[in-house]
Image (spheres, helix red, strand yellow):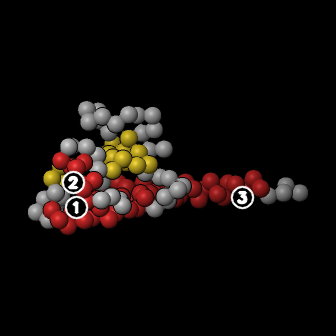
Amino acid sequence: MPIAVLLVDDLGPHRARCLSVLSKRFSLSLLEVRRSIEHGQPVVTRNLFDRQTPPFAEIFAEALAEMEALECRYRAFEVSEGQVWTSLEGYYQLTPERLRNMIGARRISLEHQRQLGELEDRDPT
């Protein structure tokens, strides 16, 4: 399963509002968010698509869009399953638009899988 990684480079001119978005969207304390940013560590490292928290990808996309609107500089990446996050490697960069496209493609794929499952479950007689 792909993992979403969010690094915040600069909170921008709306520092308090950006901290609040990060804290609320990702259920983190303000202290956790600030420490991650100050130490150059990811604020978020979480499965992008997960059955336990299905709307996470949508939450992540909304948070990125809010951060852009607040002029907060960030880098968001998708780390493929099996890859280990390091700040030195190149990863697929995520934007709100790319995330929305990924979410849409995943929904279509899941619907196709559901339809195929229904076809297989039908009695051939």
| Residue 57 versus residue 2 in the image, above or below | below
- Callout 2 crowding tier (Cα within 10 Å): few <14, some 14–19, many ≥20: some
Give the mark, 3 or 1, whose residue is nearer the N terminus. Answer: 1
Instruction: Work out which quarter of the rendered image holds the C terminus and state it.
Output: bottom right
Residue for point 21% across, 63% down? 18
Tell me the SS state at disc 3.
helix
Q: Position of residue 102 (x, y in %)?
A: 42, 54
The residue indicated by pointer 3 is 118
Question: Looking at the picture, which amino acid does disc 2 mark?
Answer: Arg
Question: Which quarter of the picture shows residue 59?
Answer: bottom left
In primary-sequence order, the first of circles 1 and 2 is: 1
Q: Nearer the viewer, mark 3 or mark 2?
A: 2
Asked if residue 94 is positioned above or below residue 87 in the image, the reply reads: below
| Crowding near the residue tagged with mark 1, few <14, some 14–19, many ≥20 C-alpha atoms within 10 Å | many
Identity of the residue furthest to the left in this view: 13
User: Above or below — where is 45 with respect to 20?
Assistant: above
User: Circle 1 is placed at which residue position?
Assistant: 19
| Disc 1 versus disc 2: nearer the observer | 2
Position in image of residue 33 (x %, y %): 26, 54
Rounded to the nearest whole Å, what is the CA distance between mark 3 and mark 1? 46 Å
- Which residue is found at the position 28% from the left and 46% from the top? 42
Quarter assignment of residue 123 = bottom right
Q: Amino acid at mark 3?
A: Glu
Tell whether label 1 touches label 3 (CB within 8 Å).
no
Residue at mark 2: 34
Residue at 40% of width from left, 49% of height from top?
46
